[in-house]
Amino acid sequence: MKHTISILVENHAGVLSRVSGLFSRRGFNIDSLAVGVTDDPAISRITIVADGDEHTAQQIEKQLNKLVDTIKVRTLSPEELLSRELQLIKISAVPSQRNEVLAICNIMGAKIADITPTTLTIEISDTTPNLTKFQELISGYGIKEIVRTGTIAIQKGAETIRK
């Protein structure tokens, strides 16, 4: 089962290394990792998506809480979170194919970020399943390159994860 863990940490050098080291020592594979500062520049949020059973996830959360630079740890259930990834995809697209690609982009909420005589670079921000679906839809045009961020997530509703 996939677990999305949101961790507030002090924004210091070496914190990410200690957090990722904890996962490594426990044999817990990280599927996605994203780090960014919060509204307070002294605090960063690390969002980790990882596979594992419920017991392993609970143990990881306990271990993360023991790290010196950790402020708060919260495992978000799928029904209480909003998550997104950003994906940039460069495809081969001659002018005669562009209307078809634009139609797919419009339906999926993507936009053209760059255009050359032979390629289109498309930007899309969405959930992991929708990014996979989009990639499948445009794969027939010849994918030249893909880059993708890690998942970022926030809790739904009025409740927050703050210091």
Image (tube, rainbow, N blue to C red):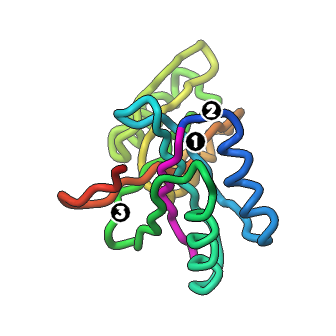
Please, what is the three-letter code of the amino acid marked with disc 3? Leu
97 is within the stretch colored magenta: no
Rate crowding at label 1 as few (under 14), some (14 to 19) or many (20 or more) other CA atoms within 10 Å.
Answer: some
Q: Secondary structure at mark 1?
A: loop
Earlier along the polypeptide chain: callout 3 or callout 1? 3
Using the rendered view, name the quadrant where residue 76 is placed.
bottom left
Rate crowding at label 2 as few (under 14), some (14 to 19) or many (20 or more) other CA atoms within 10 Å.
Answer: many
Q: Overall secondary structure of the magenta stretch?
A: strand
Residue at image x 34%, y 34%?
39
Q: Which region is colored magenta?
A: 1-10
Residue at image x 55%, y 26%?
121
Residue at image x 67%, y 54%?
19
Please, what is the three-letter code of the amino acid marked with disc 1? Thr
Q: Nearer the viewer, mark 1 or mark 2?
A: 1
Q: Is residue 105 above or below residue 156?
A: above
Which residue is most to the left? 158
Q: Secondary structure at mark 2?
A: strand
Q: Position of residue 125 (x, y in %)?
A: 43, 42
6 is within the stretch colored magenta: yes
Please, what is the three-letter code of the amino acid marked with disc 2? Ile
Residue closest to the eye, 20 or 121:
20
State which quarter of the image contains the N terminus: bottom right
Q: Which residue is mark 3?
A: 81
